[in-house]
Amino acid sequence: MAGGADPFRRVSDLSVVAVQDIVWQLLPLGLGSGQTCRRRLDRWQKAGVFERLHRILLSELHAAGELDWTRACVDGSHVRAKKGSRDRSIAGRPAEDWRKNGSKHHLICDGRGTPLHGITTAADVNDIAQVFSLVDGIPPVAGRPGRPRKRPECVLGDKGYDSKGVRRELRRRRILPVISRECAPDIKGPGRLRYVVEQTFALLHQFKRLAVRRERRLELHDGFTSLGCSLICWRRLTRAAS
């Protein structure tokens, strides 16, 4: 993000698109043309700018003691696509194989609801198929003495993540699985602890660009998703500093 304050101003410009869901062709003249902003979003996403921004903000939150590593919560949330179209940009399967329209956001957050990593898939992808991508996708978070932190002590999930293989692999990663079992009463307690991930989804989908997917290309939508997670972290950091 070289170039002084100008790149940060341009990130702010893209955040306006994410929050207000402005059509590219109707952007204010001060933000530049829609084609220029779209190309900038694509270029920065491929360069990993938004991922680095997210990691920096997580490190600042960790240094301020605002991250809760005692537990992490995972879940998925369906997102409608524009005009209800099926998402063919992710898996490439024939249209008749799709069961649902749109896409799905998969998210892992810390015990306070701070987003640690997010993934976008087709709407009919099971949550259980993304649990390891979420856990392994948590970036190394610095900010305190010692090695960067990237592993929570336990992972909380609903019955959609019930699997012996998931529990085995989480334990192999030295993470305690706290997952409800199918055909069994819900574990008492995790329901009250897991509400933070639903709260984080609500915050993420307040960005109108993420509540309904408009971009056909996955890279552009992922760019807005990473930017949305960074904005949530920035707001939490600002509130902690005030």
Image (cartoon, rainbow, N blue to C red):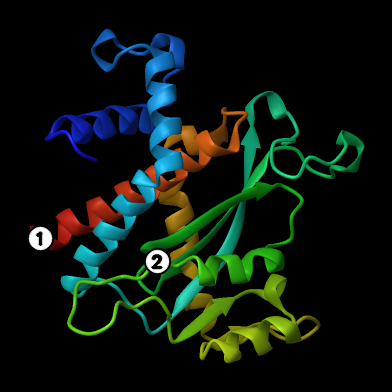
Q: Position of residue 168 (x, y in %)?
A: 67, 89
Q: Residue at x 75, y 45 (%)?
A: 91
Q: Amino acid at mark 2?
A: Pro
Residue placed furthest toward the left: 242
Judge depth for marks 2 and 1 and give the one in front.
2
Q: Is residue 241 left or right of residue 59?
A: left
Residue in the image at 70% along x and 68% along y: 128
Kindly state the secondary structure of the residue where label 1 is placed: helix
| Marks 2,1: beta carbons within 8 A | no
Query: In the figure, residue 182 lies in which quadrant?
Result: bottom right
Tell me which corner region of the image, top left, top right, bottom left or bottom right, holds residue 101.
top right
Q: Residues within 10 Å of mark 2 (few under 14, many from 20)?
A: many
Q: Position of residue 242 (x, y in %)?
A: 8, 58
Say if residue 211 shows up in the picture.
Answer: no
Q: Which residue is mark 1?
A: 241
Rendered location of residue 230, percent (x, y): 33, 50
Instruction: Give residue 34's position: percent from left, percent from top.
Output: 41, 15
Q: Is residue 82 above or below residue 65?
A: above
Query: Going 50% across and 65% down the picture, which residue do you hit?
Result: 137
Q: Count neighbours of disc 1 (C-alpha within 10 A) and say few if under 14, some if 14 to 19, many if 20 or more.
A: few
Q: Is residue 68 left or right of residue 221?
A: left
Circle 1: residue type = Ala
| Residue 139 disc label | 2
Does residue 221 sit above or below 67 in this rendering?
above
The quarter of the picture where the N terminus appears is: top left
The reply, left or right, for residue 8 in relation to residue 214 is: left
